[in-house]
Amino acid sequence: MLKKILAGFTSVALLAAAPAWSAVPAPARDNMSHALAVTGKVATPLTLKVADLRQLPPANGGEIAVTRHNGDKAETITSYKGVRLRDILDKAALDAPGHNDAKKIAIIATATDGYAVVFSWGELYNSPAGEGVIVYYEKNGKALDDGDGEIALISAKDIRTGPRHVKWLNAIEVRKLVE
Ligand SMILES: Nc1nc2c(c(=O)[nH]1)N[C@H]1C(S)=C(S)[C@@H](COP(=O)(O)O)O[C@H]1N2
Ligand SMILES: [Mo]
């Protein structure tokens, strides 16, 4: 009963307050990713800031067009600097002790806005695509700004590079899909 009264009171209060709030423009959403969490089936979960990523072996790329799934060009990146996703996963050490465990692993890369893309162990470690999957923190010679920073990911060998270009990357989850 008390709950009901309180709930009623709250909604009346909200209704009364609404016109005043709607007059104030909503603040721009801050999508910036300030760190990358590496979690799931790993021996050592990690939280990596840009300064930590800079300590890992650098992987650089030259000019690359970011193309949407329909072929439209989203942007052209002149150069980028980061770390191969494989090297990050090796630092965390995949928890896959059985002979066939690694083959059942998916790697999910997620951004602050909820955008997420999937890689497989086979793709990263046993196909030409793996070489081009790079977590980057510099674009065109500069730190990433709020358009896609502080940390992002690109899969440079994809046919269309847009879909797995993850802006505001903040998590890498290692998941074993099949027991
Ligand atoms: N974090 C995040 N990254 C993202 C997206 C998104 O919605 N959120 N969209 C993706 C898609 S589908 C494409 S094609 C490219 C280019 O997107 P744009 O159309 O926003 O330039 O960014 C990709 N990266
Ligand atoms: Mo897209």
Image (cartoon, rainbow, N blue to C red):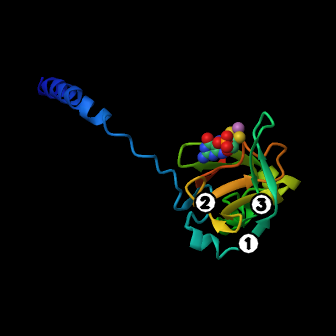
Q: Earlier in the sequence, mark 2 or mark 3?
A: 3
Q: Residue at x 73, y 74 (%)?
A: 57
Residue type at numbered disc 3: Thr
Q: Residue at x 78, y 33 (%)?
A: 70
Quadrant location of ligand 1?
top right
Residue 81, quarter of the rendered image: bottom right
Residue 58, quarter of the rendered image: bottom right
Q: Secondary structure at mark 3?
A: loop
Residue 42, quarter of the rendered image: bottom right
Residue type at numbered disc 2: Ile
Residue type at numbered disc 1: Pro
Residue 40, compared with residue 3, is above or below; it is below
| Relative depth, front residue between 168 and 108 | 168
Q: Residue at x 81, y 42 (%)?
A: 160
Q: Secondary structure at mark 2?
A: loop
Which of the two marks, 3 or 1, is nearer to us in this view?
Answer: 3
- Circle 3 is placed at which residue position? 78
- Circle 1 is placed at which residue position? 58
Which of the two marks, 2 or 3, is nearer to us in this view?
Answer: 3
Q: Earlier in the sequence, mark 2 or mark 1?
A: 1
Instruction: Measure the alpha-carbon separation of dots 2 and 1.
Output: 14 Å
Q: Position of residue 43 (x, y in %)?
A: 61, 64
Q: Is residue 119 visible?
A: yes
- Circle 2 is placed at which residue position? 151
Label 1: how many residues lie within 10 Å, few (<14), some (14-19) or many (20+)?
some
